[in-house]
Image (cartoon, helix red, strand yellow):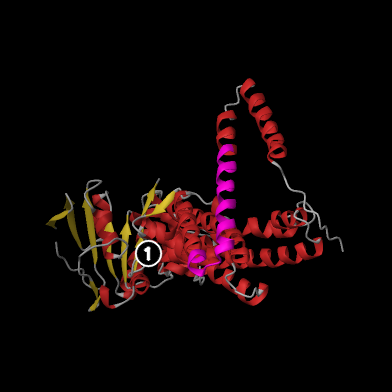
Amino acid sequence: MSFDVNSGHCLGLMGRSGSGKTLLLRAIADLDVNEGRVSLNGQFRDDVSGPEWRKKVGLLTAESKWWHESVGKHFRSSKLNLLYDLGFPDESVLSWKVSRLSSGEKQRLALARLLLMSPDALLLDEPTANLDSDSVTLVENVIDAYRKERSASVIWVAHDESQLDRVSDAKMYMKDKHLTEQA
Amino acid sequence: MIVSDIIISLTTERISLACVLVMILALTTWKADLRVARPLLVASFRLIVQLSLVGLILEYVFEINNFLLVALIALVMLLVAGKEVSVRQKYRVSGRWGYGIGTCSMFVSSFAVSVFGLAAIIRADNWWDPRYSIPVLGMLLGNTMTAVALSLDRFTTYVWEGRETIEAKLMLGHSSQEALRIILRDSLRAGLMPVINSMAIAGIVSLPGMMTGQILAGNSPVSAVRYQIVIWLLIAVGCGFGSMLVVQMAAKRVFDERERLRTDRLYKV
């Protein structure tokens, strides 16, 4: 398969569980061994180191992982506006314990953690899977603003087609590890 | 200074008395249906046979006093220790590396430290004099093997169980070393703690085996203590460098050149 996502555009990706959507995102992010050729703004993946590439191509998974006890230790900088935009009242969230967070809070904070890395492309694997409808709107707005501000390319995987109609410029369907249709 | 010039030789009858004690223990556990009598007797039998053979072999080696023979024995000890490290792992590194990383790290740490200890500290006329080199290498290998096996086991287990967290760090642009920092530290600590604990209580809670042996064999306690201090310090150095080396080699193996986590290179035993 071969496809392009223009700068500042969002490609919606749909497909049944096990159709290979996550595998595709992992391959683009260079987390699994793969033969594919990927380039971002004219630079090929194999021309930069793995960690450098993954800083440019931010992958957000449905289940976020946390390794320090406190939330703040996971953030190298604190751009507070982003936390407000994601529905957190103030900076005190950084002093919270990770064990106290709900799955929705974890998901929104994981997005903030990723965006603070300033990636040039976003690979979003069901980024609103654990969120209530208000939070879904917040997350969609934050991603949309980031995409426009940074002219970032976005691939957004979701099961909810109406969401992809709202956030993406084009949609593709995956079946049996192949892209089958472009809308 | 107490120097005994009469060494009490242990005759076969006297050793048999210790065997009788083991038999009594075996009988007691058998009566209580604890199911340890058989392994206890087998282990005791193996101990007697193995040590008796080693005693005979060492008598021969000491008499011949040949460098190549000492080197051959050292090589056999190293290979057996390497095999032991690999079988003690819950998650093994696949391929020849599984055996190689333990053996390599013990070779570099135990051998280098032993040679330094023999040539620079003990300074026998021949640095490889089997009377010194084989016991020193044996003690270093034995302890390093435990430390290396523990560190490697902890490392591969942490990597396997924490693979999703490691990948989450990689997704945020962390290098493999950054993603492994906590695991590397904890694995190294696990390997070194037994040695550090043993050193901290040496002489207070327990008398180390080599020192006890020397004292029983009629040496002065002061001289025995000096040897024991040197041996423990060498063991600590061997364990430290051995553990550091083995986890670094394993870390190289569980990541590829693109710094992708390769758990497919680990398998559960």
Residue B52 placed where, x, y %? 59, 46
Query: Could you say whether the residue bearing mark 1 is in a helix, strand or loop?
Result: loop
**Residue at 48% in and 49% down:** B88
Residue B120 to residue B91: above or below: below
Quick check: B161 left or right of A175? right
Residue B194 placed where, x, y %? 64, 55
Q: Quadrant of the N terminus of chain B?
A: bottom right
Q: Residue furthest front?
A: B63
Label 1 chain ID: B
Please check the rendered image and state whether residue B64 is part of the magenta-colored stretch, yes or no.
yes
According to the picture, the residue beneath numbered tag 1 turns out to be: B255
Magenta-drawn segment? B45-71
**Residue at 67% in and 67% down:** B233
Q: Quadrant of residue A57?
A: bottom left
Q: Quadrant of the C terminus of chain B?
A: top left
Q: Residues within 10 Å of mark 1 (few under 14, many from 20)?
A: some
Quick check: A22 left or right of A172? right
> Can residue B35 be seen in the rendering of this structure?
yes
Please check the rendered image and state whether residue A59 is part of the magenta-colored stretch, yes or no.
no
Q: Residue furthest left?
A: A181
Given residues B192 and A30, the one toward you in this image is: B192
Quick check: B265 left or right of B12? left
Amino acid type assigned to the residue bearing label 1 in the image = Phe
Residue A174 placed where, x, y %? 18, 53
Q: What predominant SS class does the magenta segment belong to?
A: helix
Given residues B13 and A119, the one toward you in this image is: B13
Q: Residue furthest top?
A: B31
